[in-house]
Amino acid sequence: MATKSNELNLTSKQRKLAELLANPDFTGSITELCRECGVARSTYYKWLDKPEFTQYVDSLISKFTSSELSTVWKALIRRCSIGDVQAIKLYFEMRRELSSKDESGVQIIDDI
């Protein structure tokens, strides 16, 4: 599946908007996002209907979330260790979900 912006034939404005949209440090509204990228809000909503645009946004979000996974996991463990009941509940829910995926019969093999 192609996720590089040039493979998806995205314009520079589409790439810029997608990168800001996926960036957790950008906290502006949709109006501010569009203004920053020099596009109309209606154009933004049209782009959301294009699979190649949303695919690129999804790939960027995946990169951002993957890079922060260890930080989030450590924060959850810290909250559990001080007795935060909601954190403990979330921890066990996540462990149960991970173990059910392990039992699904899917085997992951590392590339060498």
Image (spheres, grey):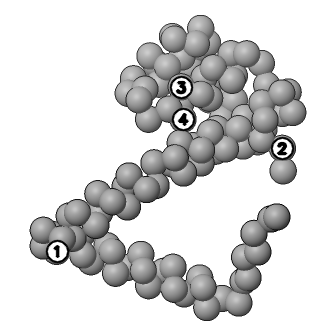
Relative horizontal placement of residue 87, taking residue 25 as reference (left or right): left
Q: Are marks 4 and 3 in contact (CB under 8 Å)?
A: yes
First in sequence: mark 2 or mark 4? 2
Q: Amino acid at mark 2?
A: Ala
Q: Amino acid at mark 4?
A: Ala
Residue 12 placed where, x, y %? Answer: 73, 16
First in sequence: mark 1 or mark 3? 3
The quarter of the picture where residue 32 lies is top left
Q: Amino acid at mark 3?
A: Leu
Residue 48 placed where, x, y %? Answer: 66, 35
Q: Amino acid at mark 1?
A: Val
Q: CA distance from mark 2 to mark 1?
A: 42 Å
Element type at marker 1? helix
Quadrant location, the C terminus: bottom right
Q: Are marks 2 and 1 in contact (CB under 8 Å)?
A: no
56 and 99: which is toward the camera: 99
Residue carrying label 4: 22
Element type at marker 2? loop
Q: CA distance from mark 2 to mark 4?
A: 18 Å
Give the crowd class for mark 1: few <14, some 14-19, many >=20 residues within 10 Å. few
Residue at x 73%, y 82% (from the top left corner)? 107
Give the crowd class for mark 2: few <14, some 14-19, many >=20 residues within 10 Å. few
Q: Which mark is residue 85?
A: 1
Residue carrying label 3: 20
Q: Which mark is residue 2?
A: 2
Residue 70 placed where, x, y %? Answer: 43, 56
Residue ranking furthest to the left:
83
Element type at marker 3? helix
Residue at x 34%, y 81% (from the top left corner)? 92
First in sequence: mark 1 or mark 4? 4
